[in-house]
Image (tube, rainbow, N blue to C red):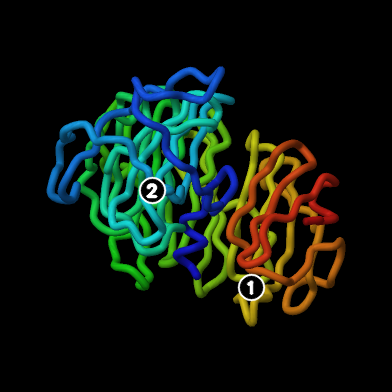
């Protein structure tokens, strides 16, 4: 389960969407819809053995349904999706849309596809700069036409941008193992990744980077010793330990923020029989103080609000100062519009 918690998709956690890819440029497009420019042609072979970007001859239209494991949009029209030509396809493909998802280009092969789709994350910061993290880390500076391997072994978490730098957490261990993540950085516009000069003090276990814009970012995670919270306000030059609201019985933490000031944290216990103790805390001062908004009770604080115990937390995201979404394994998405107190499907 800790692997699932590490690789949740920030925008909507892990949502699997099946699309049928359209023909490349020159083929017919739906009436009133401009043709979608293909981001490039598929590359062959394993990118783990190809440190530089490669191209292969242009592929024809893909007619098989493509399962998207992760989706990233930079505006209402421009987006990218990573997935495969079927749920068990071995290649990880990246497809592009420029009409809000109505049509998609033929996919570019980037890497071997992990057996667990939750370990795939695609992120874009602009029309040209993007990343795919899975079994390794891959960058593009031409909108997805070509991809460059960062040469990093192990599993890599979703990329976030803080200031003029892209960050990612790398786990050098193999599948199913626990190890201490290290922070990788890359200047925007570059395809080179290196370990950060100042590493946050993280225990072995899953963790998630959350950017709050500017030079502010958080790391939230889980360990056998309890939930983990870290914060930087200077672009990673220093990392502080803010007050941690999670009780000792709830050893996991999933964090979300829009501006670095209003912060929500879902503290979670071990999932048992499709149920999980949860407590949702809200901060209005960047994590300096916390207020309990909802709790399922059990091994956590006394039950308040309407947060149910069904489903383990896979992701948390905010859509406004008082509204947010929780993604629950096996139970879908629940939403709060009153600051995290009440939750509804």
Residue for point 37% across, 72% down? 176
Residue for point 37% across, 31% down? 23
* Residue density around tag 1, few if under 14, some if 14–19, many if 20 or more, within 10 Å: many
The mark that comes first in sequence, 2 or 1, is 2
Query: Under tag 1, what secondary structure?
Result: loop
Say if 335 sits above or below 301 in the image.
Answer: above
Residue 232 position, x and y percent, is 51, 41
Residue 13 position, x and y percent, is 56, 51
Q: Is residue 170 visible?
A: no
Q: Quadrant of residue 267?
A: bottom right
Residue 114's mark? none
Q: Is residue 21 visible?
A: yes
Please state the total of marks drawn on the protein image.
2
Residue for point 72% across, 71% down? 310
Is 254 in front, or is 82? 82
- Name the residue beneath numbered marker 1: 269
Say if 46 sits above or below 107 in the image.
Answer: below
Q: Quadrant of residue 227?
A: bottom right
Is 44 in front, or is 274? 44
Say if 277 sits above or below 117 in the image.
Answer: below
Q: CA distance from mark 2 to mark 1?
A: 40 Å
Residue for point 52% across, 54% down? 8
Residue 298 position, x and y percent, is 76, 78
Say if 31 sits above or below 289 in the image.
Answer: above
Query: Under tag 2, what secondary structure?
Result: loop
* Residue density around tag 2, few if under 14, some if 14–19, many if 20 or more, within 10 Å: few
Residue 64's mark? 2
């Amino acid at each position: 389960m800790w692997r699932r918690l590490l690789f949740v998709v920030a925008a909507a956690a892990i949502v699997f969407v099946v699309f049928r890819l359209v023909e490349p440029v020159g083929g017919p497009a739906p009436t009133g819809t401009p043709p979608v420019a293909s981001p490039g042609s598929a590359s062959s072979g394993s990118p783990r053995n190809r440190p530089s970007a490669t191209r292969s001859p242009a592929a024809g239209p893909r007619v098989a349904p493509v399962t998207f494991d992760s989706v990233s949009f930079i505006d209402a029209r421009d987006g990218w999706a990573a997935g495969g030509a079927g749920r068990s396809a071995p290649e990880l493909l990246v497809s592009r849309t420029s009409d809000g998802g109505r049509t998609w280009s033929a996919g570019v092969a980037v890497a071997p596809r992990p057996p667990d789709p939750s370990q795939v994350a695609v992120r874009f910061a602009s029309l040209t700069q993007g990343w795919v993290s899975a079994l390794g880390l891959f960058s593009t500076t031409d909108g997805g036409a070509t991809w460059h391997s960062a040469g990093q072994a192990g599993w890599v978490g979703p990329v976030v941008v803080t200031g003029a730098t892209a960050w990612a957490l790398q786990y050098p261990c193999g599948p199913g193992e626990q190890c201490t993540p290290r922070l990788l950085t890359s200047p925007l516009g570059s395809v080179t990744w290196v370990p950060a000069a100042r590493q946050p003090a993280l225990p072995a276990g899953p963790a998630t980077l959350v950017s709050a814009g500017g030079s502010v970012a958080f790391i939230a995670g889980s360990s056998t010793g309890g939930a983990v919270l870290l914060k930087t306000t200077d672009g990673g030059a220093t990392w502080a330990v803010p007050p941690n609201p999670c009780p000792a019985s709830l050893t996991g933490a999933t964090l979300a923020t829009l501006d670095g000031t209003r912060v929500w944290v879902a503290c979670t216990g071990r999932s048992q029989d499709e149920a999980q103790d949860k407590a949702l805390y809200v901060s209005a001062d960047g994590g300096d103080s916390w207020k309990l908004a909802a709790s399922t009770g059990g091994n956590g604080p006394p039950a308040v609000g309407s947060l149910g115990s069904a489903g383990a937390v896979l992701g948390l995201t905010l859509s406004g100062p008082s509204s947010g979404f929780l993604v629950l394994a096996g139970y879908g998405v629940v939403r709060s519009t009153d600051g995290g107190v009440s939750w509804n499907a």
